[in-house]
């Protein structure tokens, strides 16, 4: 007979979702509780945990973006089969389309419910292949006595899996696993997992391989425009206020412009950060004036950047110098947004350099095929670096990141463009030339921003005299 226990704690402070799953008998909730709470900053709205039998524990820290009523709380049961239990950190952008396509009845209003409905009808592999979104989830099938898990193709939502013999733990971050697992590894993006073969991950996503129909550069640019616009529009799904990080560089400026064009909520808030005299602050203000957004310019003295390093290292679980360096500004601006605005959903320009060949060193690629190989490598490994930075810096302040450049349709298309068209010399043809050209002549951005040469975020926030 199943024993089920619920724990609910409603918090007033608004500090993204954190998930935790344990299958085993060594440890009780009382033993694990403090470590599970080490990631509760990811979810401010409530915390639930549920024990099923004597060997399964789910815990969930929730930031409600869609389905903000209690019906969207997790762990979530299938509406017609309570032997299926789901825990998911994610946003499923095509949940209504899938429900209509397969005549599935959505009950809770939560976009994540579609995962359970699809799983019951079609199983794990078809489910993850058809989801359009960002996610890390675990499903318990009590009747079969089996576990299933899946992660989105680019790893936008975090996930770690740990084990000690037959004991299994899965969580949004590594913190709750460290004391209990002999083996811990990131759950690989674009893969699903089944407890029958616990050492095996099953890939369901091919990063390229589509045959593009467009033959001319003009048609390719039109397609880039359409796909990125759609990537932004589908991510506007939210029941909480939306804001944009705006560094003044090409990537965040393009995303801010598209959000501003299609967002039907209150006047769009944009946010920039830098040391006094930062070149990024100047360009960000130029873009904000052009878009007529409600702009917040945050000048932070050098000592505040330095003082935040220890907290940032704890949050991102990494000592990688480049990642830490870039994370400090992200963390501080997210902290400001959390404390000084009602925005909970934050758009950013992350992923453009990896997908669109934006790093300056790529101009030295010895051939177009070498450029293609390096771009694919960067995308496959982005979850170790930029995606990690973005998720942890933003979620640790109780906000949710939206990253349109890592939309799977956009990524698959851009990787399938003939690589010779993505080559650049940095003089006559700038990095990310096709992306720039796709939005040229439309007054979506000032020309000096649309054709601005790349400047890394952590360099741009520095003062000009540094």
Image: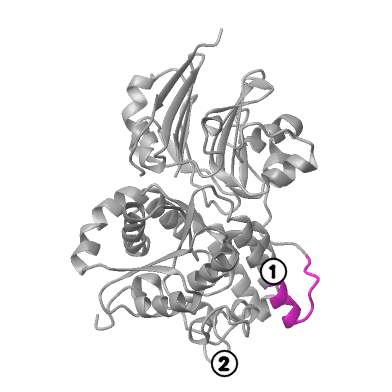
In depth, the one of 351 and 45 nearer the eye is: 45
Q: For the residues marked 2 and 1, what is the alpha-carbon distance in whole angstroms?
A: 26 Å
- Residue drawn at 52 percent across, 38 percent down: 68
The answer to whether residue 317 is seen in the rendering is: no
Q: Is residue 222 magenta?
A: yes
Mark 1 is surrounded, within 10 Å at the Cα level, by few (under 14), some (14 to 19) or many (20 or more) other residues, namely: few
Residue 131 left/right relative to 215: left
Residue 432, horizontal then vertical, whole percent: 57, 78
Question: Residue, x 60% and y 74% (percent of image)?
Answer: 371
Please provide percent x and percent y for residue 363: 53, 82
Q: What numbered label is drawn on residue 226?
A: 1
Against 326, is 173 above or below? Answer: above
Judge left or right: residue 88 versus residue 172: right
* Residue 464 occupies quadrant: bottom left
Please identify the quadrant where the N terminus is shown.
top right
Coordinates of residue 298 in the picture (x, y in percent): 30, 67
The secondary structure type at the circle numbered 2 is loop
Residue 78 circle label: none
Q: Quadrant of residue 211?
A: bottom right
Inspect the magenta stretch and tell me whether residue 217 lies in it.
Answer: yes
Q: Where residue 129 sits in the image (x, y, percent)?
A: 70, 46
Magenta residues (range) = 211-224
Quadrant location, the C terminus = bottom left
Residue identifier under label 2: 428
Specify which label sits upstream in the sequence, 2 or 1.
1
Compared to 445, does 259 lie above or below?
A: above
Q: Residue at x 57, y 46 (%)?
A: 91
Q: Is the residue marked by circle 2 packed among few (<14), some (14-19), or many (20+) residues within 10 Å?
A: few
């Amino acid at each position: 007979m199943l024993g089920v226990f619920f724990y609910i704690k409603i918090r007033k402070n608004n500090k993204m979702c954190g998930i935790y799953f344990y299958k085993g008998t060594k440890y009780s909730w009382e033993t694990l509780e403090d470590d599970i709470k080490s990631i509760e900053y990811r979810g401010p709205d409530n915390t639930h945990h549920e024990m099923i039998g004597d060997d399964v524990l789910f815990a969930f820290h929730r930031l409600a973006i869609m389905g903000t009523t209690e019906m969207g709380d997790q762990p979530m049961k299938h509406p017609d089969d309570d032997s299926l239990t789901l825990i998911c950190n994610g946003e499923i952008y095509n949940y209504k389309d899938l429900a209509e396509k397969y005549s599935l009845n959505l009950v809770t209003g939560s976009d994540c419910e579609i995962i359970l409905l699809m799983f019951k009808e079609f199983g794990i592999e078809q489910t993850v292949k058809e989801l359009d979104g960002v996610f890390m989830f675990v499903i318990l099938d009590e009747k079969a006595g089996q576990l299933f898990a899946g992660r989105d193709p680019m790893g936008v939502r975090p996930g770690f899996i740990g084990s000690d013999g037959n004991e299994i733990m899965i969580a949004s971050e590594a913190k709750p696993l460290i004391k209990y697992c002999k083996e811990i590894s990131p759950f690989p993006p674009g893969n699903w997992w089944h407890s029958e073969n616990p050492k095996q991950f099953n890939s369901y996503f091919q990063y390229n391989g589509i045959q593009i129909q467009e033959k001319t550069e003009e048609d390719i640019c039109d397609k880039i425009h359409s796909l990125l616009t759609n990537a932004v529009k589908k991510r506007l799904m939210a029941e909480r206020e939306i804001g944009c990080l705006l560094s003044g560089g090409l990537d965040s400026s393009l995303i801010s412009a598209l959000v501003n064009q299609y967002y039907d909520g209150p006047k769009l808030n944009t946010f920039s950060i830098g040391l006094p005299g930062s070149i990024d602050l100047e360009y960000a203000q130029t873009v904000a004036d052009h878009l007529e957004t409600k702009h917040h310019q945050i000048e932070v003295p050098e000592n505040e950047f330095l003082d935040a390093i220890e907290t940032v290292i704890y949050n991102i679980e990494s000592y990688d110098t480049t990642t830490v360096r870039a994370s400090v500004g992200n963390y501080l601006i997210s902290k400001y947004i959390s404390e000084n605005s009602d925005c909970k959903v934050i758009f950013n320009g992350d992923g453009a350099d990896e997908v669109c060949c934006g790093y300056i060193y790529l101009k030295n690629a010895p051939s177009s095929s070498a450029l293609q190989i390096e771009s694919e490598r960067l995308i496959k490994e982005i979850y170790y670096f930029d995606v990690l930075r973005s998720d942890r810096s933003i979620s640790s302040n109780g906000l949710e990141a939206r990253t349109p450049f890592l939309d799977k349709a956009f990524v698959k298309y851009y990787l399938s463009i003939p690589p010779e068209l993505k080559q650049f010399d940095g003089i006559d043809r700038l990095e990310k030339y096709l992306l720039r050209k796709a939005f040229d002549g439309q007054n979506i951005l000032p020309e000096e921003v649309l054709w601005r040469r790349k400047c890394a975020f952590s360099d741009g926030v520095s003062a000009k005299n540094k």
